Amino acid sequence: MHNVVISGTGLYTPAESISNEELVESFNCYVEQFNTTNAAAIEQGEVQALGPSDAAFIEKASGIKSRFVMDKAGILDPQRMKPRLPERGNDEPSILCQMAVAAAEQALQRAGKTAADIDAVIVACSNLPRPYPALSIEVQQALGIQGFGFDMNVACSSATFGLQAASNAVQLGQARAVLLVNPEICTGHLNFRDRDSHFIFGDAATALVVERADLATSANQLAVVSSKLLTQFSNNIRNNFGFLNRAGEEGEGARDKLFVQEGRKVFREVCPMVADLIAQHLAENNLQVTDIRRFWLHQANLSMNHLIVKKLLGRDASVEEAPVILDTYANTSSAGSVIALHKYQDDLPSGALGVLSSFGAGYSIGSVILRKL
Amino acid sequence: MHNVVISGTGLYTPAESISNEELVESFNCYVEQFNTTNAAAIEQGEVQALGPSDAAFIEKASGIKSRFVMDKAGILDPQRMKPRLPERGNDEPSILCQMAVAAAEQALQRAGKTAADIDAVIVACSNLPRPYPALSIEVQQALGIQGFGFDMNVACSSATFGLQAASNAVQLGQARAVLLVNPEICTGHLNFRDRDSHFIFGDAATALVVERADLATSANQLAVVSSKLLTQFSNNIRNNFGFLNRAGEEGEGARDKLFVQEGRKVFREVCPMVADLIAQHLAENNLQVTDIRRFWLHQANLSMNHLIVKKLLGRDASVEEAPVILDTYANTSSAGSVIALHKYQDDLPSGALGVLSSFGAGYSIGSVILRKL
């Protein structure tokens, strides 16, 4: 059985970003148009007037100031309010593949490896672009990687669950190294007309090279010490878009075919589950919370992260202990905790311990203990 | 590290089935209506007349005589030609969950285990019903299973790839047993108006209990000896339906948003890949082809299976060596090889070796060597 390290991390950040102010201007324009168009019905109490959004409220409620996106113009067009991503031919690379490849190339470079060193590709993300062929196989081909690939989905926790799957394959000798990628176009499944959630998501892709420790040559290695996963069913974050919609056509295009969330319930239920899982995971590994130098947490909501780390530490965490990327990236689903890991690891001294933790829809929660080599 | 066995298999077969004759009658009714409606344009050479389908041709070309389906009436209605599966509320079990649970209950019973003995659920299939929450977590809840779950997709090979993932988790002590389920409503992504492919798919669900050998108590155990996976990109089987379609709306509802295949190319390219992979896998395990008592192959096309086993054995295989379920089930994607395994294992003597092999879109190919205990 082989020891396993993360020998390289990579990040693709879209070229365009949208500030809260820009997003709110577009949303409020939509609201004004809606209320004007429906003025008579609103007057008669048949239709409810929409209320405006507010940039300061968004930042206060979520910690988000802006988000990177794959298509700014389409999202901000009040007549459209969704990204415009023209169809591509089957022989062109898909947009999620391109994002994955960009992140992967950086991860390979940081690992000091090439496609010839990789034996498998796992794509793990919260929304796959098509049922077949698997996106992982397209990524494999784009990079020239032999071996095998498959796609996984367990929403926001796809990165930690994917990391366990990748680590298992390396430990058991099925691959010298696995490329794990988390490409997310979250703006593709966000309802930009919903005031409660129109601000929460951004787009990004991350990549990890998960490699046999004895083959790794990278200067920045993190040993995969242990992982612990937990899922518990909840409808509080749900999206019913799927291939069977055409068989139940009465619901096609309805609101539940995009992201829908009961935010307050999620906050109340998920925070204690995450803190408990991490505490239990550390205890099983004979570690104290104070042994952990850094928590790379899923980036959905700043107050959630504050609460989770406070439950663990018994005090507020510093930004060095629990880095934040949510302010500029928003929630990028599975990519979030890996973006934090990618950006905040090089300063760690040898031997330092960290926890990569994801949580979200499902509910799904993952905790991976990493040790800087 | 733990040894791993399949301690139970399960199968859910839909109540309704459609014979070739029934399917062809509906298709030809559609063709007649189309040609009548478009008679003038066909006459002027602007529209191409559609040709009829033929039950005897279907059986000769594929080996399929009938298929089980989740909704016969909707598929056979010439005005509809797709299953009618009414939308369900979020608090009702989804239809794929129900199919998965039915197969799982049989697998648990055959394994002599209950939900309390299972620590993880993997749903692996060619089309997931929604992005989140993961179907695996819904199955977990429906059965009362603690632990974790995630969804996987690598099309027709989802069962063998899922079996490797499940086996890895058990080997490494992450789960005492994993429930692997393959629920497939293939008729939901089949274009019943396409003469070349309208007959190929059926619906079914399979389940495996993948368990630590030292905990298994079942009378019918198959040791998981070794697995080998391979993927190589191809557009010859493709379906572009997905969450980004709304961002490229010019293509919404187009033919490529359902199953599309270049059947002859697939036949020519995939058969040698499968035979080579199995041969290589056996050689790596110091086994001869003649050591293998049974090949539980993916069930897509009878000639493909004949050719693959002939390439391996150097002669035609008997139905005992390569059992066929395709005649009554058609292609059920990831479920196919597991249906063959489920139906044709109890007669094997202790020590007998078999190969479970999947192949299909991606391309994706899996080979798992099993030994009857």
Image: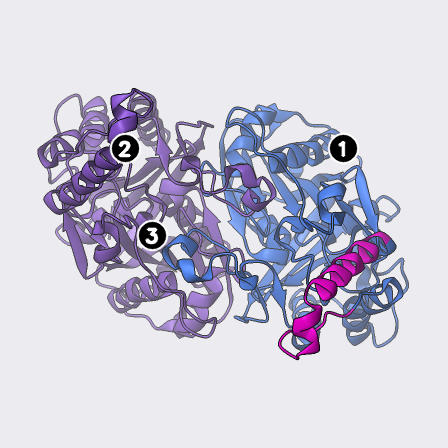
Chain colours: A blue, B purple
Quarter of the image holding residue A74?
top right
Question: Which chain contains the residue that carries disc 1?
Answer: A
Q: CA distance from mark 3 to mark 2?
A: 35 Å
Question: Which residue does the image show at 51% across and 33% down from the upper left?
Answer: A137
Q: Position of residue B192 (x, y in %)?
A: 28, 42
Circle 1 Cα neighbour tier, 10 Å, few/some/many (<14 / 14–19 / ≥20): many
Q: CA distance from mark 2 to mark 1?
A: 61 Å
The image shows residue A57, relative to residue A66, as above or below, that is below
Image coords of residue A354 (percent x, y): 77, 56
Q: Secondary structure at mark 1?
A: helix
> How far across and down, in percent of the image, does residue A280 sit?
66, 71
The secondary structure type at the circle numbered 2 is: loop
| Residue at which label 3 appears | B184
- Mark 2, residue position: B38
Question: Which amino acid, mark 1?
Answer: Arg
Left or right, residue B62 beside residue B229: left
Which of these two is toward me, B50 or B131?
B50
Residue under pointer 1 = A110
Q: Which mark is residue A199?
A: none
Q: Which residues are magenta?
A: A22-51
Say yes or no: labels 3 and 2 on the same chain. yes
Name the secondary structure under disc 3: strand
Question: Disc 2 marks which amino acid?
Answer: Asn
Q: Between residues B185 and A345, which one lies in front from this camera angle?
A: B185
